[in-house]
Image (cartoon, helix red, strand yellow):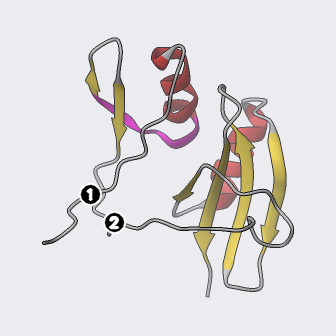
Amino acid sequence: MTVLRIVADFQADDPQTESRFYRELLDLDVVMDQAFIVTLASGETMAPQMSLMTEGGSGAPVPAMSIEVDNIDAVYERAKRLNMEIVYTLTEEPWGVRRFFARDPAGRIINLLQHIG
């Protein structure tokens, strides 16, 4: 048996509004819109992963989801420009990532990160 994909499924009162947050911040594409569900995707290929956490690291809260990007500085600046709530400021962590946490429209904390070194 092989896991092919892991998908984050979030409750959303207004999927179109919430999808705008992720499209504007991360340039994701709408690949399915059935009104009750909006699925966003990137054209990149990734390995399925899931993390089980007691805390978010460095005393941060546990995020609902982590999204790795290739230019964290650009995403951080975009989040600030779009007046998104930054929950944990851009930080270089001792385990080799630069990251920040933003709150999405439903109040979920999203970990946005880039591996360094």
Q: Quadrant of the C terminus?
A: bottom right
Which residue in the structure is indicated by mark 2? 48
- Foreground residue among 67 and 25: 67
Give how far across and how far down residue 24 sits, in percent: 55, 31
Give the amino acid at mark 2.
Pro
Q: Residue furthest left?
A: 1
Residue at image coords 84%, 72%? 58
Give how far across and how far down residue 97 sits, in percent: 66, 76
Residue at image coords 36%, 48%? 7
Left-right relation of 29 to 106: left
Which residue in the structure is indicated by mark 1? 5
Cα distance in 3D space between marks 2 and 1: 5 Å
Q: Residue 1's quadrant in the figure?
A: bottom left
Q: Is residue 40 above or below residue 59?
A: above
Query: Magenta region: which residues?
Result: 25-31
Give the amino acid at mark 1.
Arg
Left-right relation of 106 to 69: right
Query: Neighbour class for label 1 at 10 Å: few (<14), some, many (≥20)?
Result: few
Give how far across and how far down residue 38 sits, in percent: 36, 24
Q: Earlier in the sequence, mark 2 or mark 1?
A: 1
Q: Is residue 72 above or below residue 34?
A: below
Disc number for residue 75: none
- Badge 2 vs badge 1, beta-carbon distance below 8 Å: yes
Q: Is residue 115 above or below residue 20?
A: below
